[in-house]
Amino acid sequence: MTPESQVSHFKYQITSFSLDETLALGQKIGEIVVKGTLIALIGDLGSGKTAFVQGLARGLGVPAGYYITSPTFTLINEYPGRCRLYHVDLYRIASIVEAEDIGLLDIMEGDGITVIEWADRIEKDLPAGCLRLHFETTDDDTRVISLQAQGGKENLMLKEIKNWIEEQQCV
């Protein structure tokens, strides 16, 4: 992975050149994320959102026997780990009212880690304190991932991620 810009206003952008790099980013965030964190994922189909969550689950210590898939039809999957992981997919949701009907607000206010794919569907209703990742596909293997932190703990996580990526460049 290579950084595309430096942290500015708690934003950082990287380029992932492979599925393994996207998984590694998710795993690193899973290792440092703290209880009660909301991670909003935005990107087109096939842009790497679910792969990122698979890595995140690995970093959170979700047992290997759990296969992490996008909950497009179930809407929410729950996994045990260091912190409980709630994997939400809003692809089929049109409004915050529908999201409330599936219990999303209660989950977001809990002490687990909530990851929302297609978070742009409720963008204006997301709390200020969250970590946002925007995935952009540039070719079959390459993704530009923009990370934006909003909130104290999220800013600290983003700085730690930035430092980790820069350390990877020196290896």
Image (cartoon, rainbow, N blue to C red):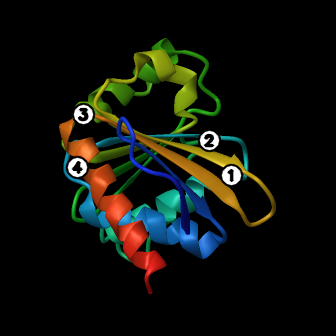
* Distance of label 1 from label 3 (alpha carbons): 26 Å
Q: In front here: 65 or 118?
A: 118
Q: Which residue is mark 1?
A: 47
Residue annotated with mark 3: 151
Nearest to the observer: residue 98 or residue 12: 12
**Quarter-wise, where is residue 95 in the image?**
top right
Of pointers 1 and 2, the one earlier in the residue sequence: 1
The foreground one among 144 and 167 is: 167
What amino acid is found at the position of numbered circle 1 in the picture? Ser
Q: Position of residue 119 (x, y in %)?
A: 52, 32
Q: Report the amino acid beneath label 4.
A: Leu
The tag on residue 73 is 2
Sequence-wise, the earlier of marks 4 and 1 is 1
Is residue 148 in sight in this rendering? yes
At label 3, the amino acid type is Gly
Give the CA distance from mark 1 to mark 2: 19 Å
